[in-house]
Every structure is written in structure tokens, then in C-alpha cells.
Image: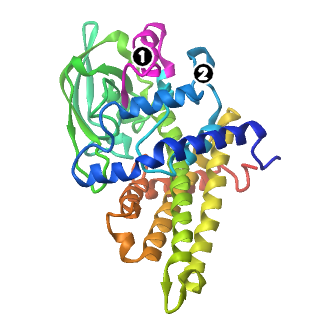
Amino acid sequence: MFLRLTDEQRMVQKTIRKFVEKELMPLENEVLRNEREGRPSLPPGKLKELQLKAKEAGFWGINTPAEYGGAALGNVMMAIVIMEVSKTFVPFQFGGSADNILYYSNEEQKKKYLIPTINGEKKSCFAITEPSAGSDTRNIKMTAVKDGNEWVLNGEKTFITGGNEADFVMVIAITDKERHKATLGREGVTCFIVDRDMGWRSEYIHTMGEWGPASLIFENVRVPEENILGELHGGYKLGLEWIGYARWVVGARAVGAAERLLQMAIDYSKERITFGKPIAERQAIQWQIADSAVEIEAAKWLVLNAAFTLDQGEDNRHLASMAKLYGANMGNRVVDRVLQIHGGMGYTRELPIERWYREARLWRIYDGTDEIQRMIIARNLLKGHVKIGQFV
């Protein structure tokens, strides 16, 4: 067992860190100002410009297979990259990638959707959540009814990340009501690739954070048979695979943000003088810093273990739930401590701490709430699907 990064991984980590420090962090004040004044975080075209700069440095399609022009660095490296990028709140992601389930496309779908997405010519989103069906997929109501060589979709999806910007959506709908009911939602649903110009529309959802998801409305949207992604009635498995990947990624984001926030607290505590000495010399502050450091390291290893297990071709869903549950809660605790250490200044919009505070609260909700993760972890253990100490 080797618990250190390889030389190659360290080199990639160092290069990504330099990119974040040189290209992204200098934009932070501009992002804060834009958001305070109600404008988009980044001006039009800036994200694309940054992605092309990253491409020039060799970072394009970090986890995309080599056959599609990607670097195929694997999930452990992906986790490390996410941690580094998450040390800034500037909204950025490396180009050249696509949702993991889009690789289940057939050859025609790859030409029409996968390749353009990887090339940055199209934007996608994934939609399973509904107003009455979040983690409880058994309660999905959206239907797809066969009519000749087309399927007619009706229903609404909500809280969809990227839904306002997407050119197409990979959406889950019921295609066999009886089968869906009999299998408690595990069968009888299908994933469809649906272009925006086929007729669905999106509505922006305002949130307490700077990020706004979308509601997607489908009213008699006609989708051709060839736009089924994967197998007919096999959408539930695709949904699980998409969500399983997303969960440990949330943990990675929390680790990166928490590391940056903790460093801010350390720096500030050395400068802030009260009653004649820096607050860094106060035990109350030292304990908050120590607890945060320990929790960040614990979360980091949970995330890396989930990513490593996936790289081995093994089922990492249990570990992904643990990484998300602990990582998201760790991030909330750390940002709360950091805001407390900064006092009144931490509460102002002059610093990004309150922004991170609002963003961090979402980590415990999307891609499966805390309660759902606890239910999954407990069920796996109580039913014997997973043994204590199994993942070593």
C-alpha cells in the first residue's frame, strides 16, 4: 500500500495549482464585484478563454479517454485536480469532458452529442430530480409514451445543474408504469437525450447562493426512438452511475475549499491583534484550527479512497456516500469556524467567506442529502452488502 502521490501526480498537482494561482485567483475580486452588482460571475467568453489557456498547458479532457483526445488521468488524479480548482470560488472547470453516462451513446449519438460536448461545442445536463421526487426515485412522475417511432415526454424536472445553459438534456422518464411500480422504481424508466429545440424549456431557480439551477418543463415533447441513451427501461442504472460519480466529487470540492479557507484563517489569526497579542495565541482559535486541519485530512482520504476504488473497476458507491456525507459536513464546519475567526469581517461581502458559507450549505443537499447518505451507509452495513474494514 502506497499512501503518497506518484511523481507524475505531484507534477500535475503542482501545475494545476500554479494555473489556479496565476489565472483564477486574480479574478476573485472581479467575481465578487460582479455578483454583488447582479451580473454573471464571469463576463461572456471568459470561461472559454480560460479553458483554452488550460488546454495550451496540456489540461484538456482530464478524465476523458485517450481515443476522444483526452488525458485519461483517472479518478484519483481527477479528485486531486478538483481539490486544487476548488481552492478558488471563481467558477471554472477544465474543458474537453462529458458526463460519464454519455459514453453509453451508440455510434450515431457519439457523433451528434458526445464528440461535440467534449469539443466544447455543446453543453449538456442530467435530469432525474422532480418536484416530488428527489432522492426517492420511486416517486418519479415524468412519462414517456410511445407514439410510432417517437416517444412523447411530459413532466417537470427541477434543481437541474446546468439546465439553463444546456443544449440538450439526458432525462429520466417512466416508459413502463407497471414495471416501475413493481420494481420500486428500479426498472421501467429510460434515459433520453433531448435537444432543447425539441421543445423543452428551462426556468431559472433563485437560491441563497450565487449559483442558480433550473426547472425543465416538458409538454408533449416528441423524441425520436434513436435518442434513447443505453437500453430501453435501463435508465435507473445510468442514473445511479451518474449520481455515484457526482457524490465523491462533492467531497473533493469541500476539501479544496476548506484547505483555502483554513489557510485564510491561519493567516488572519496571526495578524489580528486583541488585548495586546495575535488571536493565533488564543487556545480557542488554536483548537478551531486544529480540528479543521484534522477533519480536512480525514475527508481527503475518504475522497481519494472512493476515487481509487473506482479506478480499480470496483463498486465505490458505499465509499462515495461516505466521502460526500463526511466531506460536505466537514466543509460546513470549517467555513463556519473560519467565519467566526474573522469575526465581523467574515460576515461582510468584502471577503469571500460568506459566499463560501452559502455555497457550502448546498453540498449537504444536492446529489443526495445527508439523510440519504446515512440511510445508504447504514443499509449496506445492516444488510451485509459491505463489511466493516472491507475497503483496505
Our reading of the magenta stretch's main secondary structure is helix
Numbered range of the magenta stretch: 103-125
Which of marks 2 and 1 precedes in the sequence? 2
Disc 1 residue crowd, few under 14, some 14–19, many 20+, Cα 10 Å: some
Its colouring scheme is rainbow
Question: Eyeballing the image, is 154 above or below 294?
Answer: above
Residue named by callout 2: 65
In the displayed structure image, the side of residue 83 where residue 31 appears, left or right:
left
Query: Could you say where residue 76 lies in the image, as x and y percent from the top left?
Result: 65, 40
Question: 10 or 333: nearer the eye?
Answer: 10
What's the mark number on residue 229? none
Query: Could you say where residue 378 lies in the image, as x and y percent from the top left?
Result: 56, 57
Q: Is residue 296 visible?
A: yes
Q: Quadrant of residue 221?
A: top left
Question: 138 or 88: nearer the eye?
Answer: 88
Residue named by callout 1: 116
Amino acid type, callout 1: Pro
Question: Eyeballing the image, is 101 above or below 281?
Answer: above
